[in-house]
Image (spheres, grey):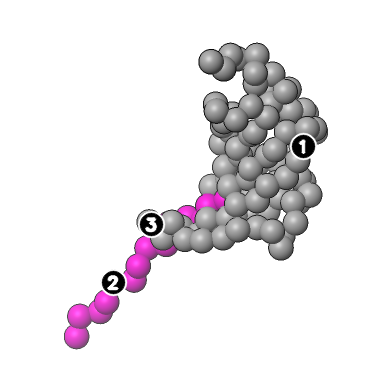
Amino acid sequence: MRTFADHARTVTALHELAAEYPLLPAPDVQIVPHLPGELMLSCWDLTAFEAWREALHADAEDVEHGVTQVGQVRLIAAAKFNGITVILHGYSPQIRPQKAEVA
């Protein structure tokens, strides 16, 4: 069974990210319960994603991309920060399909 102490490095790294990048947009944060040493940051704006990607020095060429079932662009990047893996997710606003004009 995992304990909260298993996530001590991740919690410390999260605190260090906040101290090092206080002016970056605030992402949603998730400490991955079954993977100590992994932190997920989700940005609901692609500009915020890009700011975090650059700050974490994640290669643009390694960014995975796709489209969600609701039509959002989804980007994923991974980087190391102070000994933990940071998985960065970025989502665009939902793209609403254009309604066809009735003649």
Q: Is residue 17 above or below residue 72?
A: above
Instruction: Categorize mark 3 by other alpha carbons within 10 Å: few (<14), some (14-19), many (20+).
Output: few
Instruction: Categorize mark 2 by other alpha carbons within 10 Å: few (<14), some (14-19), many (20+).
Output: few
Task: Looking at the image, tell me whether mark 2 or mark 1 is earlier in sequence order.
Answer: 1
Q: Which residue is mark 1?
A: 81
Asked if residue 45 can be seen in this view, the reply is no
| Residue 30 on image: x %, y % | 56, 32
Q: Amino acid at mark 3?
A: Gln
Q: Is residue 98 magenta?
A: yes
Q: Quadrant of residue 2?
A: top right
Asked if residue 74 can be seen in this view, the reply is yes
Read off the magenta span: 90-103
- Asked if marks 3 and 2 touch (Cβ < 8 Å), the reply is no
Q: Which residue is mark 3?
A: 69
Secondary structure beneath label 1:
strand
* 3D distance between C-alphas at marks 3 and 1: 31 Å
Q: Which residue is mark 2?
A: 99
Secondary structure beneath label 3:
loop
- Give whichever of 1, 46 is nearer the camera: 1
**11 horizontally vs 32: left or right:** right
Residue at the image point whose x is 68% and y is 23% from the top = 11
Q: Amino acid at mark 1?
A: Phe
